[in-house]
Image: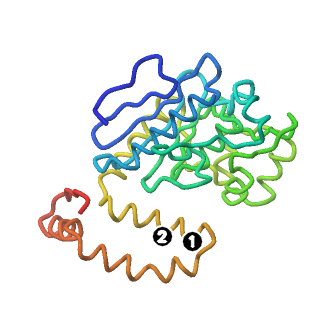
C-alpha cells in the first residue's frame, strides 16, 4: 500500500503513515452503517494489511459523528432472505473474525454511536479506545434479530456472562465509562480527535516492537483463547526458540548493549 488516502468517495478510506495503516469507515450520511460494498471493501483492506510486511499496526475508526451504527439492514435484506452468510472471496479477510483473525495488531477507536456490528468490529480489536461520547449497543433482540456478528462469543468472553447478557438481552445501551468497567475498552479520551490520536500513538509503539515477536504473541494468545490452551502451552518452547534465531533478536540485544532504540526489520 502506498502512502496517502483512497478517493474521497470510498466507503472505506485508507491512509498510510509509515508503518501504520489508518482505516476509516466512511458512510457518515448513513451513520457509518455497513452495507455489502463497505463490508467487502473492509475485508479487502484487512487482507492487504495482513499481507503487507511493511505495515506493523492498523487503526480502525469512523469518519463523521459516529463510529458505526452497525449493519445496513435494508442493504442486506435480500441477502438475508437467502439464508446465506456474506460470502468472502479470495483476497478478503473477514472483518468480524468469524473465519480467520488478523495475524497483526488491530486497534479500534470508537466514538459516538457504536452499535451492533459496529460494536462487534470493536470486539475483534486487540486494543480498544473510546472517546468519552461513545455510546455502545447490542440491541438486535429489540428488532427481531440477534447479535450474529460474534458478540455472543466475544462480548461474553470480554465482559463476562452477566455483564454481556445485561445488555444483549435487554437491548439497553451503555457509555464509555461502563465499557471500561466491564473490560471492553482499555482507554477513554475526552473527544474523537484525542481518541484517534491516542490510537495512533499506541499503534506507533506497537510498530516499534519486533514484528515477528508481535505475530507470535498474537498467534499464541489466539490459540489459547480459542479453546486450545494446552496446545498453546506446548507450542511456547518452539516459538521462543524460533525467535532466538532471528536477526531481530540479535538486533534487540545489540541495541540494548549500545544504549539505543532497536531497528527491527522482521527477519
State the image quarter where residue 114 is shown. top right
Q: Check the image and report above or below for 173 versus 105.
A: above
Q: Which mark is residue 224?
A: 1
Residue 69: give x, y in percent of width and height.
68, 30
Element type at mark 2: helix
Mark 1 residue crowding within 10 angstroms, few (<14) / some (14–19) / many (20+): some
Q: Which mark is residue 220?
A: 2
Residue 45: give x, y in percent of width and height.
45, 38
**The C terminus appears in which quarter of the rendering?**
bottom left
Mark 2 residue crowding within 10 angstroms, few (<14) / some (14–19) / many (20+): some
**The N terminus appears in which quarter of the rendering?**
top left
Write the residue at 51% across / 50% down: 127
Q: Is 65 in front, or is 94?
A: 94
Residue 76: give x, y in percent of width and height.
71, 30
Q: Check the image and report above or below for 172 versus 209.
A: above
State the image quarter where residue 199 is shown. top left
Direction from residue 209 to residue 161 in the image, left or right: right
Q: Is 144 in front, or is 133?
A: 144
Direction from residue 117 to residue 246 in the image, left or right: left
Amino acid at each position: 500500500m502506498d502512502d496517502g488516502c483512497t478517493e474521497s468517495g470510498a466507503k472505506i478510506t485508507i491512509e498510510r503513515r509509515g508503518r501504520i495503516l489508518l482505516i476509516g469507515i466512511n458512510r457518515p450520511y448513513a451513520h457509518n452503517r455497513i452495507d455489502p460494498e463497505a463490508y467487502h471493501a473492509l475485508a479487502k483492506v484487512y487482507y492487504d494489511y495482513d499481507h503487507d510486511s511493511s505495515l506493523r499496526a492498523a487503526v480502525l475508526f469512523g469518519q463523521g459523528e459516529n463510529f458505526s451504527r452497525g449493519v445496513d439492514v435494508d442493504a442486506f435484506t435480500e441477502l438475508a432472505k437467502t439464508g446465506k452468510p456474506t460470502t468472502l472471496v479470495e483476497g478478503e479477510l473477514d472483518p468480524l473474525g468469524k473465519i480467520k483473525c488478523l495475524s497483526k495488531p488491530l486497534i479500534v477507536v470508537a466514538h459516538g454511536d457504536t452499535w451492533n456490528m459496529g460494536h462487534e468490529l470493536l470486539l475483534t480489536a486487540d486494543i480498544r479506545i473510546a472517546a468519552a461520547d461513545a455510546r455502545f449497543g447490542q440491541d438486535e433482540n429489540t428488532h427481531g434479530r440477534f447479535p450474529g456478528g460474534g458478540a455472543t462469543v466475544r462480548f461474553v468472553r470480554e465482559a463476562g456472562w452477566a455483564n454481556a447478557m445485561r445488555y444483549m438481552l435487554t437491548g439497553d445501551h451503555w457509555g464509555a465509562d461502563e465499557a471500561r468497567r466491564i473490560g471492553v475498552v482499555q482507554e477513554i479520551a475526552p473527544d474523537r480527535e484525542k481518541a484517534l490520536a491516542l490510537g495512533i500513538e499506541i499503534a506507533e509503539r506497537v510498530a516499534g516492537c519486533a514484528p515477528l515477536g508481535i505475530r507470535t504473541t498474537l498467534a499464541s494468545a489466539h490459540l489459547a483463547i480459542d479453546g486450545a490452551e494446552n496446545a498453546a502451552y506446548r507450542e511456547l518452547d518452539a516459538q521462543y526458540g524460533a525467535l532466538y534465531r532471528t536477526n531481530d533478536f540479535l538486533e534487540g540485544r545489540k541495541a540494548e548493549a549500545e544504549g539505543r532504540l532497536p531497528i527491527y526489520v522482521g527477519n
